[in-house]
Amino acid sequence: MNTEDNKQLIMQCYQLYKDKNIKGLLNLFHDDIEWIANDSDDIPYAGSFHGKDQVAQFFTMLDQAQDAIRFEPQDFIAENDMVVATGISSWHVKSTGLTYDNPWSHIFTIRDGKVARLQQFNHTAAAEAAYRPMREAGMAKAAPMRH
């Protein structure tokens, strides 16, 4: 695939995500895809995932945890087998009722016409703050009472 084809592939990925067609999206990924993101104790879908099955679990956890209020890819930069996409999003956390804004950058590596790797960078602190009240409430319930 050439650079423009790679860029079109990534645009197609985002459209499938926005259409909630996760099965179609997964078909554009290599079986051994690497999905790399920051770890967080507060965010239920945080961390890295390897292989289509784990990436499918990521999308299930994401869907169970939050709803997209806004998800807008903005720029696509492609060179050789890599595509960088930047965008903005806003999310509603189901467990806390809080929302957060999340500017993001995704770096994709394409191999044989499919996505082989995604590394994402986003506003982890904003997401943690939106999830944290749930965690802190749970910790407060578990804390022993002092007399």
Image (cartoon, rainbow, N blue to C red):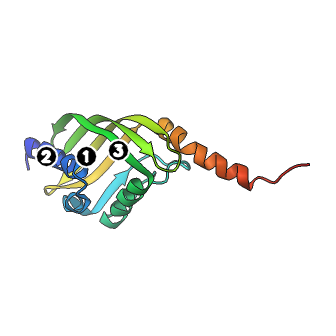
How many numbered circles does the render carry?
3
Tell me which residue sits at (33%, 67%) in the image.
53
Q: Which mark is residue 127?
A: none
Residue 15: give x, y in percent of width and height: 19, 47
Disc number lying in front (3 or 2): 3
User: Helix, strand or loop at disc 2?
Assistant: helix
Tell me the kind of residue under disc 3: Ala
Tell me which residue sits at (10%, 42%) in the image.
3
The answer to which image quadrant residue 7 occupies is top left
**Label 1 or label 3, whichever comes before in sequence order:** 3
Tell me the kind of residue under disc 2: Asn
Tell me which residue sits at (21%, 51%) in the image.
19
When the figure is inspected, residue 60 is found, relative to residue 90, above or below; the finding is below
Residue 21: give x, y in percent of width and height: 22, 57
Q: Alpha-carbon distance for marks 3 and 2?
A: 25 Å
Residue corresponding to mark 1:
108
Query: Cβ–Cβ below 8 Å for labels 2 and 1?
Result: yes
Residue corresponding to mark 3:
68
Tell me the kind of residue under disc 1: Phe
Pick out the residue farthest to the front.
97
Q: Alpha-carbon distance for marks 1 and 3?
A: 21 Å
Tell me which residue sits at (38%, 50%) in the image.
36
Residue 28 visible in this rendered orientation of the protein: yes
Residue 85: give x, y in percent of width and height: 25, 38
Residue corresponding to mark 2:
6
Q: Alpha-carbon distance for marks 2 and 1?
A: 9 Å
User: Helix, strand or loop at disc 3?
Assistant: strand
Residue 123 visible in this rendered orientation of the protein: no
Dot 1 alpha-carbon crowd within 10 angstroms: few under 14, some 14 to 19, many 20 or more:
many
Is 47 or 91 nearer to us in this picture? 91
